[in-house]
């Protein structure tokens, strides 16, 4: 859930008073109670007034610094104030008017009916420094107390979050109330829509917008019920701008989800992250990561995705690329061979010999076909399955004791074990969590072979690093997309 925030409404002529108030609020902000929205975070060229109004919509408490300048400011009078009072009347915003300087505030009906600070309405200006300091501390404590009251009510005014998981052939979506207990999400089943592979920016934005509309209809929600939209995108994401830079599976580059959807869904904040990191976020809050300070998730499907958690926070690293174990190089042999067929297999990233090139679904099927071809037909059923052979069938055959399938499983698991051991030796996480479609059938079969490799390859104290199976096999990314609005998220990233 979005961290609760305070909005300070003031005239620019009272900037020094605003700085005083914010200085006190920052003490509580440092304790993680709430964040203070600051207008200086708006960059040159951005639309200042719409950012201000959006911040009002997100705030739960607003402090109004009353002075004659404040009351005569055109922007305050015509834009900020109507919005503040509207939200107050809806019961979603608590207003604390603070009389900063002498003014004719008693003449205004909306204000004279409201309790003002300091009590009695004597302005801060003219107080002794010690008295002013005491008054500001009292006001700040009162603001903090109003948040506590709001949280006691279950934060019900925080609104719904829409989570979206983008795939190349389907989009999964759900609406979430993040104040509910985590265990309820185990039963969650998303709305799924089959789509054609988008391949261009306009098409994918249309598809996502349409799916959001449908999931809101399905859950009987209006657009105004939504506070945030989280998107899990398959590929490289620039998190602060909410841009999918490169989505190879979707066939798109530079898709500005945040800019587009925030424009379509006014007053709704949009956050975007890589899908594997979203699924990792789900394990962090609701899954097997709940008891770990540091862990890495590896999701194996048609590709290999991963997410890294350090000190219970998603770790992004430079350019939001941390933890991509799939592109760690496992094989350098024959890389310069004149015959391409002797070179290590090509990875989706363009390089050869990456871990992903060996352990993804299609690579496992390829290896199974090759292995079956060198096996007597009577001894393996893999050869009978022929061209339509799937990774799921290989996993089942291995479970049933098929020797060729067992050989394939072992070979892939050992490569994965080497990749995992490298990762453990560098990052030293408490646990490695394995998930994704391929792990559905292979988890038990593979960990049997991964463990001995870890025993050989990991540094001695790290050999007992926990291996765990992801709790959320299929819907982790949708839930994790909504969790981009979890209260523990680093608000600064999206500011
Ligand atoms: Zn690669």
Image (cartoon, rainbow, N blue to C red):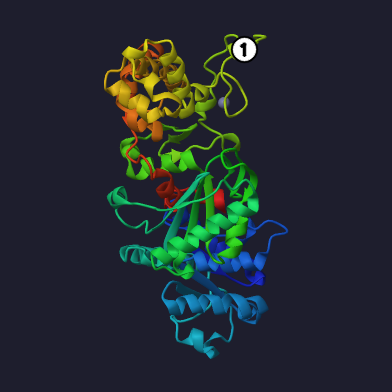
Label 1, on which residue?
A: 335
> Measuring 42% from the left and 50% from the top, which residue is drawn there?
483
Residue 25 visible, this angle = no
Above or below: residue 413 compared with residue 258: above
Q: Quadrant of residue 441?
A: top left
> Measuring 67% from the left and 9% from the top, which residue is drawn there?
338
Residue sitting nearer the eye, 241 or 163: 163
The quarter of the rendered structure image containing the C terminus is bottom right
Any atom of ligand 1 within 8 Å of the CB at mark 1? no
Q: Secondary structure at mark 1?
A: loop
Above or below: residue 144 compared with residue 433: below
Q: Residue furthest right?
A: 45
Where is residue 56? Give x, y as percent: 53, 68
Q: Is 44 situated left or right of 319 in this image? A: right
Where is residue 89? Give x, y as percent: 44, 80
Where is residue 84? Give x, y as percent: 52, 75
Where is residue 155? Give x, y as percent: 36, 63
């Amino acid at each position: 859930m979005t961290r609760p925030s305070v909005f300070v409404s003031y005239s620019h002529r009272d900037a020094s008073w605003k700085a005083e108030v914010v200085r006190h609020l920052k003490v509580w902000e440092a304790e993680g109670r709430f964040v203070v929205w600051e207008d200086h975070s708006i960059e040159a060229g951005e639309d200042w007034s719409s950012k201000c109004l959006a911040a009002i919509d997100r705030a739960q408490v607003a402090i109004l610094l009353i002075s004659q300048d404040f009351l005569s400011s055109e922007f305050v009078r015509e834009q900020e104030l109507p919005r503040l009072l509207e939200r107050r009347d809806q019961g979603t915003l608590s207003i604390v008017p603070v009389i900063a300087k002498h003014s004719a505030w008693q003449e205004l009906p909306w204000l004279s009916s409201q309790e003002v600070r300091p009590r009695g309405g004597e302005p801060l200006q003219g107080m002794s420094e010690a008295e002013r300091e005491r008054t500001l501390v009292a006001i700040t404590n009162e603001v903090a107390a109003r948040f506590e009251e709001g949280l006691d009510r279950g934060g019900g005014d925080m609104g719904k979050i829409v989570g979206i998981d983008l795939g190349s052939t389907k989009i999964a979506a759900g609406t979430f109330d993040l104040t509910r207990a985590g265990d309820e999400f185990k039963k969650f089943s998303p709305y799924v829509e089959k789509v054609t592979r988008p391949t261009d920016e306009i098409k994918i934005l249309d598809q996502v917008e349409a799916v959001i509309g449908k999931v809101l209809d399905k859950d009987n929600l209006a657009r105004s019920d939504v506070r945030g939209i989280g998107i899990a995108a398959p590929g490289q994401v620039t998190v602060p701008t909410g841009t999918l830079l490169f989505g190879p599976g979707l066939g798109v580059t530079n898709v500005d989800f945040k800019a587009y959807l925030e424009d379509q869904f006014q007053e709704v904040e949009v956050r975007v992250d890589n899908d594997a990191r979203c699924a990792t976020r789900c394990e962090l809050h609701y899954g097997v990561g709940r008891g770990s300070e540091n862990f890495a998730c590896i999701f194996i499907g048609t590709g290999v995705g991963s997410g890294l958690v350090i000190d219970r926070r998603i770790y992004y690293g430079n350019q939001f690329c941390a933890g991509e174990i799939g592109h760690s190089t496992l094989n350098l042999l024959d890389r310069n061979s004149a015959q391409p067929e002797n070179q290590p297999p090509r990875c989706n990233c363009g390089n050869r010999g990456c871990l992903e090139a060996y352990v993804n679904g299609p690579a496992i099927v390829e290896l199974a076909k090759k292995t079956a071809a060198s096996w007597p037909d009577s001894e393996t059923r893999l050869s009978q399955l022929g061209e339509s052979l799937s990774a799921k069938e290989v996993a089942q055959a291995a479970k049933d004791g098929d020797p060729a399938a067992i050989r394939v499983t072992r070979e892939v698991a050992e490569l994965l074990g080497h990749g995992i051991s490298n990762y453990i030796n560098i990052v030293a996480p408490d646990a490695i969590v394995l998930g994704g479609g391929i792990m559905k059938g292979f988890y038990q079969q593979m960990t049997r072979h991964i463990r001995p490799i870890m025993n050989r390859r990991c540094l001695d104290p790290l050999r007992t690093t926990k291996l765990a199976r992801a709790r959320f096999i299929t819907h982790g990314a949708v839930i994790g997309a909504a969790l981009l609005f979890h209260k523990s998220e680093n608000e600064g990233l999206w500011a």
